[in-house]
């Protein structure tokens, strides 16, 4: 029963993952190059690139960035809702930014059910970051954004993600199974104990009835 519950939870987790996730994922890696000016040392340049990466990473989720993506002409305005709030929410669902710790490197992942449209969105994002980054960083920043890798298209979810979900669902299901079996046995034990106590309490009455029956037969 415990193993069965584990298998059922793992299967349910897999179904939820497949239904929830988009079919394709396109990822692109970017490098922030901060050109040296004045007496800046390497450490200052590195920390500055790290800070600018955080600024860009947060800016990508903004409505302003969505507008710049549309201005590239690679995607139509109708690919998102025309309501501002819904547009930002939908955008945040298909975009994911991952930054390397203490490095001016970050990756942008775009997910979607249509491979061609997903690639176009990724290309539009790269266009904005490479050619229009001054909108978000300021005109005085001596910065270049370069594409390191990508865009790379992959099926989504990945096999590693599927394996983790299945294993995690199995472990969670087994845990639930143990808890269920424990409480079921505890309830059965308490129930049986109650009936045993009730039967023990009635034993003197049964003995008295038996002795009375014997006396009746002897008298006869």
Image: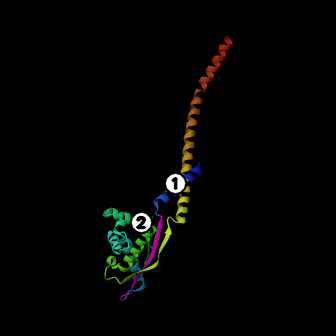
Q: Which residue is mark 2?
A: 94
Residue nearest the observer in this picture, 17 or 9:
17
Q: Position of residue 55 (x, y in %)?
A: 36, 74
At mark 2, the secondary structure is helix
At mark 1, the secondary structure is helix
Q: Is residue 100 visible?
A: no
Q: With 151 as the anchor, is 196 left or right in this view?
A: right
Q: Is residue 67 visible?
A: yes
Which quadrant does the C terminus fall into? top right
State the predominant SS element of the stretch in magenta. strand
The answer to whether mark 1 and mark 2 are in CB contact below 8 A is no
Q: Position of residue 7 (x, y in %)?
A: 57, 53
Residue nearest the observer in this picture, 208 or 189:
189
Any magenta on residue 24?
yes
Magenta highlight range: 23-38
Q: Residue at x 52, y 54 (%)?
A: 12
Q: Name the disc covering residue 12, or none.
A: 1
Q: Residue at x 34, y 62 (%)?
A: 86
């Amino acid at each position: 029963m415990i193993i069965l519950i584990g298998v059922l939870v793992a299967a349910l987790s897999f179904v939820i993952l497949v239904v929830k996730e988009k079919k394709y994922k396109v990822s692109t890696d970017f490098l922030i190059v901060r050109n040296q000016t004045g007496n800046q040392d390497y450490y200052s340049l590195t920390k500055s690139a790290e800070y600018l990466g955080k600024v860009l990473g947060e800016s990508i989720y903004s409505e302003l960035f969505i507008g710049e993506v549309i201005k590239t002409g690679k995607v139509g305005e109708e690919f998102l809702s025309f309501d501002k709030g819904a547009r930002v929410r939908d955008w945040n669902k298909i975009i994911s930014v991952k930054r390397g710790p203490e490095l001016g490197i970050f990756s942008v992942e775009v997910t979607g059910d249509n491979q061609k449209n997903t690639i176009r969105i990724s290309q539009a994002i790269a266009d904005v970051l490479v050619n229009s980054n001054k909108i978000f960083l300021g005109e005085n920043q001596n910065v270049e954004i370069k594409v390191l890798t990508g865009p790379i298209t992959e099926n989504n979810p990945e096999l590693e993600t599927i394996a983790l979900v299945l294993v995690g669902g199995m472990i969670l299901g087994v845990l639930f199974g143990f808890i269920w079996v424990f409480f079921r046995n505890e309830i059965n034990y308490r129930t049986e104990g109650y009936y045993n106590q009730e039967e023990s309490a009635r034993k003197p009455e049964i003995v008295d009835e038996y002795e009375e029956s014997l006396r009746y037969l002897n008298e006869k």
